[in-house]
Amino acid sequence: MSASPALEPAEALVLRDDSAAGVTTLTLNRPQARNALSVGLMAALQDQVDAIRDDRAVKVVVLAANGPGFCAGHDLKEIRANPGRRHYEALFAQCSQLMVTVTRLPKPVIAKVHGIATAAGCQLVATCDLAVASSAARFATPGVNIGLFCSTPMVALSRNVGRKPAMEMLLTGDMVDADTAKAIGLVNRVVAPEALDDETAALAAQIAGKSPMTLATGKEAFYRQLELGLDDAYAYASQVMAENMTRRDAEEGIDAFIQKRPPEWRGE
């Protein structure tokens, strides 16, 4: 049985690695439970993401996991050990807050998926801005199979893939292989297992080479405009671009392009 949240060593549930320039890797570390999202694991990940928010040294975040699986969703043993509507509401509110925090983090987040990502684990992949998957990875929203529809995973899933593929995953609970996940837009790239680390690191380094101000501006604008009608989206995006143009990094980037030299970003 998985340890209760009170007994879990919170400091070990998520590991942080800052060894790559501009890139921080957060690794889920409940391998014995296939990184099921216990209350403790979600709290630890929330703390790490919150700490990264204003860390100017971090330009890109990679979300990885230890053990055979990426994330098996919520910890069902923990849930059944704490029955009652009040606990359930608190649990799903905690998970929803974590997902929203990842979306609103002003730095791109890349999921590095080496194994299964099911239910809230699939939600976590869909919530990340980008995802690189091993060809051995599998994805599912299988709650329907145990009488618990994946309603919160549905929010992120339906914002990443088309309605028909999303509904098929939600209604059947079937596993989707990595190539299918790429075809429907759940992940960006699929690589051989032995190439996953290098492919993810290269993508993270490429993005980390951009202006952090521009990345933060673009990520926020991307998600905000999606929720607007067409006219409002263009009006909002036009204002964002006008403001972006007044920033030092935009002026530097344009001058560097004209002068045919590398830009020097300051994040301003």
Image (cartoon, rainbow, N blue to C red):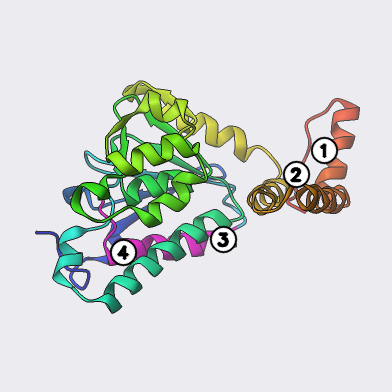
Q: Is residue 50 magenta?
A: yes
Q: How far separated are the C-alphas under marks 3 and 4?
A: 19 Å
Q: Is residue 160 visible?
A: yes
Q: Quadrant of the C terminus?
A: bottom right
Question: Which badge, 3 or 4, comes first in the chain's sequence?
Answer: 4
**Type of residue at label 2?**
Trp
Q: Are marks 1 and 2 in contact (CB under 8 Å)?
A: yes
Q: Circle 3 sits on which residue?
A: 53
- Magenta segment range? 35-55
**Type of residue at label 4?**
Glu
Q: Position of residue 108 (x, y in %)?
A: 57, 46
Disc 4 element = helix
Residue 184's place in the image compared with 170, above or below, is above
Residue, x 52% and y 45% (percent of image)? 159
113 sits to left or right of 32: right
Q: Quadrant of the N terminus?
A: bottom left
Magenta segment, prevailing SS (helix, strand or loop): helix
Q: Circle 2 sits on which residue?
A: 265
